[in-house]
Amino acid sequence: MYTPHTERDIAQMLEAIGAASLEDLVKVPDAVKIREQLDIVPALAESDIVRRFEHFAKKNTGVSCVSFLGAGAYRHYAPPAIAALAMRGEFLTAYTPYQAEVSQGYLQAIYEWQTYICLLTGLDIANASVYDGATALAEAAIMSINANGRKKILVSRAIHPNYRAVLKTYCDGLDVTIDELPVAEDGTTDLSGIAARVAGKEYAAVAVQSPNFFGNVDTPDSQAQNAIRESGTVLIGVVAEALSLAALQTPASWGAEIVAGEAQSFGVAQAYGGPYVGFIASSKEHMRRIPGRLVGKTGDVHGNEAYVLTLQAREQHIRRERATSNICTNQAHCALIATIYLALMGKTGLRDAASANLKRSRELATRVSSVPGCTLQFDAPFFNEIVVNVHRPAREVLAELQKRGILGGVDLGRFYPEYADCILMAATELTSAADIETLAATLQEVVHDTVRV
Amino acid sequence: MTRFASDHTASPLIFEQGQDGRANRYVDEGAPLTDYLPKDVLRGHLPLPDNSELAVVRHFTRLSQRTFGIDVGFYPLGSCTMKYNPRVNDAMASLPALRDLHPYTPDELSQGALQIMWELERTFCSLFGMAAFSLNPSAGAHAELAALLIAKAYFKDRGETQRDKVIVPDTAHGTNPASAAMCGFKVISLKSDERGRVSVDELKKVLGPDTAVCMMTNPNTLGLFEDHIHEITQAVHEAGGLMYYDGANANALMGNARPGDMGFDLMHLNTHKTFTIPHGGGGAGHGPVGVAAHLVDFLPTPYVRSRKKTNGAAHADRAPSDQLEFWLDFDRPKSIGPMRSFWSNFAHCVRALAYIYANGAEGLTKVSQLAVLNANYIRVKVRDFLDTPYDEICRHEFVASAQELKKETGVRALDIAKALLDRGFMAPTMYFPLIVPECLMIEPTETESKETLDEFIGALREIVQAAKSDPEAIMAAPQYTVVGRLDETKAARQPDLRWRPATA
C-alpha cells in the first residue's frame, strides 16, 4: 500500500480528529453505498508483481521479430545516459512547475526544449509540448480557426491516417468540416488545384505532412505557398518522424506558419504507442493562440536570471471556457527525454543518425524491389520509409512473413483501399544489413508462394 | 528549521556550452546527406550544439538538483494527489518486451500488452462502478473532452441536438469549462451553497430540455463530499441530462464509494494522480474515460476486447485472464473516434496495474481511508492558527484561508506558500477553488507519515506566528531557494521563450 501508518499512528490521529474509525471518515449516504463485491486482482508481494509482469512480457512475442514497422512510431538508438538522467527522482516526481523558485531546473529544461524545437523547425516559438503528433495537428487546426475565424480545414490524404482521424474527432466537437487533398501518382500531395481551392477563403488551414505517411518528402512549391498565404489560409506543416528535421529543409522554409509534430524519435520508447510527445511551433504572430504551457526567461527580485511559466492568460485555469485549449497536463517528461537526447546527439550525432536512416532505407528499397513481384509504388525522394507494392493483398503477404518471424511493415489497405497491395516499410539506423537480407529472401519465398486471389 | 538545499550551482543553457568537434559517437559516422537526397530538399546549417556526454550528464544532473519532486520532500499540492511513486512500477514499464513493443505489432504478438490493458480496464470498471473504460485519452483534460464528445454523440444519436448546456459548479477545475467549450457546449456556472456544496434547488432552476451534462467532482475541490449527490443525479437524469464525474479527486473514495453507484454516467480518472504514475514535471499523464452501459458504443477507439482462448489448456495456477485472448477493436461505428495517435499511454497502464497488484481491493480501500485520515489530521491541527472555512470532516483534501491573517498582518496565502518553500516543503495549491479568498488547498496523500505531517503543521504554525511578529520576513520569502520571487510581469510583457544564436 506504500502507507507508513502504524496502528498507533492511526489511533492517535483518529483521536485528534474525533472520529471513531477509518470507516467513519469515509462514510457515504445509504443511497449511494457500494452495491457489490469489488472484483479486483489479489494483492501480491513485489517479487510476485515482477513475476506477473515478466509473464506478460513473454507474451509480447512481437518484440523479438525482425521488424520494419514505422508509420509514426520509430525504433531509434537511445543512449543509456537518457534514462539515467531522466529517471532522476527530482524530475520524475515533480508536478507542473508552478512554484518557479524550486523548479528552476525543470523550467530551464523546458526552455531548452522550446529552443530545440524552434531551431529544428525554423519557427519563432514552441510550446512545452502537447500529447502527441495527432493531437498537435488538432490543436494547430484550432489555432488556425482562432486566427482567421474560418470553419473548414483542408488536409492532405498523405497525412498519417491516425492524425486525420483524431483531427476529425476534435473537429466533430467544434462543428468544423474537413476536406481532403488527393495523393498524386508519385506519392506526394496533389496540390495542382490548390490556388482555386483556397481562393474562396473558406479554409482556416491547409495541412501537409513531410515526410508524409508514405515516407516521401512532400512540401508545397513556392506557387502553392503563395496561393495559400495570399488567401489568408494558415499552412500547417506536420512532422511525424522528427529525425527528418535534422536532414530536410525546415518547415518554416517551405512556408509553414504552424508546425505540428511528434518527437517520439528523439529517445522516447515505442511502448506500444505511448506516452510520446507532441510539439507545436509557430510564427510569432500566433504566440497568444498557442495551446498549453510556455516557459519564459525573466529575472527574480535579486536580479538573477530565472525561468517561469508565462503567458498563462491563454490557459484554462485562468480563462476557463475562453481558454485557447483545455490542455493542462502535457508531456513534460517525454519532452525532457527528447531534450536530453538532442543534447547528447548534438548536430553531428543527429546528422549521422539521419544519414544512417537514409542509407538503410535506400538499401531496403533496392533490395526489396529486386525481389520478383515486388515494386516500389512511388518515386519521390523519401526519408526512411518506402511503399512496396507486392501485387497481391499485402495483408496475406504480411501474415506469411509473420509466420516466419518477420514484421514486414504496415498494410496500407488498412487505411487506403486503393493501396491494398502495398506495404509501408521503415528502415532506421538500427536496421541491419542482415535484417534487410532476411526480409528480402523471405519475401521472395512468400510472394512466390502466395497464390494471387 | 529545515531548508531546501539552496547551493545548487546553475548550469548555463546547453546552447551556450557546446564546442564543434566534441561529438559523441552513438551511431556510425554517416556519408554526406547529398549522397542520398537532392540538395534542394536538404536543410543547410543545423544550429545545434555538440557536447560531450559528461557535459550533458552534469548539465541535467544540476538541473535536477534545482527541481523539487516528491522524492525531495512533502508535496501537499491540493487536487494533484502527489503520492509516492513506487519504483517497481517504473521497472516494470522498462521491461524490454513492454518498453520496445511497436504499436502496430499484430494483436496475436502483443497479447501481454493487451492483457495488461484489459486487466486494468476491468479493475477500473469494478472499482468505480462503470460498464466500460477507454484507456485512450492522454490526461484528465483530454478525457473530459472525450467524455463530452461522447455526450454530444449520444444526444445526436437520440436526436436531441438541442441539448447544448453544460452545468459546472463554481468549485470545478478550470479544465471542465474549457473542455465543454471545445465541444461547442455553453457553460452554466453554478454557485455553491453556504455549506460549500451544490445546491439541489439552484441546480433544478437551470435544468431543462437544453441540459446536456452536469460536471461534478465528488468530493469537490473543497474536499467536501456532496452528500446530496443522489438527489442531484436523479434531478439531472429526470431532465434528460447526463452526469459527469471528474476523477481528479478519486483518491478520496476509491474502494469506499463508486461514481457508478452515485448515478454518474461518465467519468474520467487521472491515473497519474490516484494510481501513482509519476507526474514527470507536467506529464505524461493518463486519463481513462469510463461510461455506464448506455454509452459504451460511443467510447473512443480502439477498445480492448477479449474472448475465451480456443485451444488454451486451463492452468490451475494462472489468473482467470490467462484463459483469454485479446484484441484491439477498431470497428465501432458509433464511436467518437480516436483521441490520440496510438492506443494508450501504455507505459502508464503498466505502472497503474503494478500499483493495483501491490494493493488488491483491500489495499486500495485502505489507501483512500488513510488519505482522508491524513487530510483531517492536518485540518484539525491547522485550525488552531488558520481559518478553515468549511470546518467539518473533509475527504482527501481541505482548504484553509489566510484572509484573517492578511487583514491582521498583510501576509497573504502566496507569502505563506513561499515561506513553506524555504522550509523544505512544496507549497499547497493557492487561490483555488476561486470561492475561498486567500485559499490554501492542502492534500497530503496517504503515503506521508504522521511525523512528516507534524513537521509540516509545525512549519505552518511557525510561519503564521512569524507573520504576526515579523511580517516583512515572511513577505520576503523565499530566501533560501536558488532564486527569489520571479518577475512574472516582465516574463509576460517581454516574452523570451527561447534562446537565439548570435547572429553571424
Image (cartoon, coloured by chain):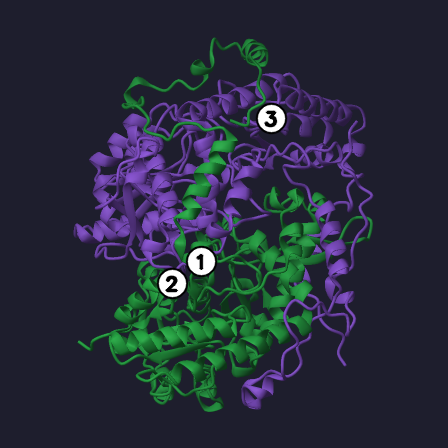
Chain colours: A green, B purple
Q: Name the residue tied to disc 1.
A: A64
Would you say B276 lies left or right of B412 here?
left
**Residue B102 % position (x, y):** 43, 59
Residue at the image position 50 percent from the left and 22 percent from the top: B372
Q: Which residue is mark 2?
A: A405
Q: Give the vertical position of B287 relative to A126 (above or below).
A: above
| Other residues around mark 1 within 10 Å, as few (<14) / some (14–19) / many (≥20) | some
Callouts 1 and 2 close, C-beta under 8 Å: yes
Q: Mark 1 vs mark 2: which is more N-terminal? A: 1
Q: Measure how far apart labels 3 and 1 are at the Cα level.
A: 42 Å
Residue under label 3: B448
Which circle, 3 or 2, is nearer the viewer? 2
Q: CA distance from mark 1 to mark 2?
A: 8 Å
Chain letter for mark 1: A
Q: Tell me the residue at 39%/43% (across/down).
A: B116
Query: Mark 2 falls on what kind of element?
Result: loop
Q: Are marks 3 and 2 on the same chain?
A: no
Q: Please report the residue visible at 55 percent of the width from the left and 10 percent of the height from the top.
A: A11
User: Is residue A303 or residue A110 the one in the foreground?
Assistant: A110
Report helix, strand or loop for mark 1. Answer: helix
User: Label 1 amino acid?
Assistant: Ser
In this rendering, do the residues under marks 1 and 2 share a single chain?
Answer: yes
